[in-house]
Amino acid sequence: MTSTKSKASKDPKSPKAPRICKAPLVPVTVPTKSGERYYEFQDWFNRHAYWKGNHDLKGLIVTFLTPAQQEKLNNGTFRYIIAMKNFHCSMKLVHCLILSHVFTNDRDSISFKIFGCDVSFSLEDFHIMCDLRIITHNVEKSIKRESKILKRYLGKSKGMTLKYIREYMIQNQIKKDDVNFKHVCESDEDAVKLMKILIVESILFGRKNESTMLEEYATIVEDDEACLNYPWGSASYEKLITSIKYALDNKDKNIPTEYTVGGFSYPLYVWFYEHFPYI
């Protein structure tokens, strides 16, 4: 007597168990010697890379801040960031740079092999482009405490998302035709500090709208002296480089996926074209 199990296996109508073939993950081997590639050219593969920072910051500044407030922002800690025409860059190029990454032991630079040339994007390069303070040692984490400015205008300090603060600014745009218009912020300093918090989170750290803001950075921005002396350049650079180094870890090159790059990638984009202007 034939078992039910045997009949089911011979039945042409019964579904076949799918074959699962695991494709190799890249990189296959992790380089250990300086100058070794993470990805050989024959291993290159397409991916959709994204930077989730705020591309529309310029428009938000114009609609939320008065001319006097904009002047304060333009002359403050992030003046070189504000002076940039835009924050758009080719993420296809950034993806190619990630694939061109070579191993080094230098903590303050990341190296690439491009067209046979060994080039490095250093912390000093980032500093020159952004004019943000850098330090030679690790960035110390600030003490967590409540952000007074977020609580005053947004109702709470902890768990606030970038989307919420952007919507707040959009809802309280300057009404140019209203002669009796009064800005939602009590002072020019408060309005500028709210915008600086957005610059730090969405530009320097490249966080997406749904991300929760970190209270410690908001409290640093609130303190004028602390904001001036904080190594924003080192913190942003570290975020970018760490993101680049591990962006493709455990990614299957045979399965289309997307990934995001953190930090501020625009200076890396500018740096590339300064080195290879005829590309």
Image (cartoon, grey):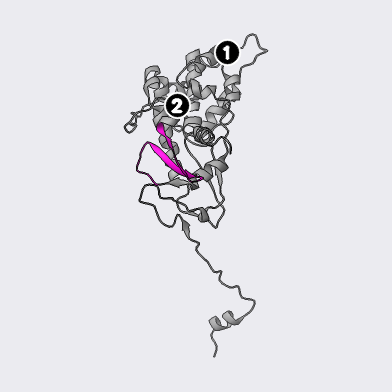
Where is residue 274? Give x, y as percent. Answer: 52, 32
- The part of the chain drawn in magenta is 103-123
Identify the residue at image location x=43%, y=44%: 245
Question: Marks 2 and 1, Cα distance to the nearest angstrom?
Answer: 28 Å
Quick one: label 2 or label 1, which is nearer the N terminus?
1
Apparent side of residue 141 relative to residue 126 in the rendered image (left or right): left
Residue found at x 56% / y 49%: 47
Q: How many C-alpha atoms fall within 10 Å of the one at disc 1: few (<14), some, or many (≥20)?
A: few
Helix or strand or loop: what does disc 2 sit on? helix
Badge 2 amino acid: Ile
Circle 2 Cα neighbour tier, 10 Å, few/some/many (<14 / 14–19 / ≥20): some
| Image coords of residue 111 (percent x, y) | 43, 41
Q: Tell me the quarter of the picture where residue 235 sits.
A: top left
Q: Position of residue 25 (x, y in %)?
A: 47, 57
In the image, which disc is placed on residue 67?
1
* Callout in the foreground (2, 1): 2
Residue 88 seen from this side: yes
Residue 39 position, x and y percent, is 47, 52
**Residue named by callout 2:** 128
Q: Residue furthest bottom?
A: 1
Along the line of sight, which residue is nearer the eye, 261 or 16?
261
Say which residue appears at 50% left-offset and 63% top-offset. 22
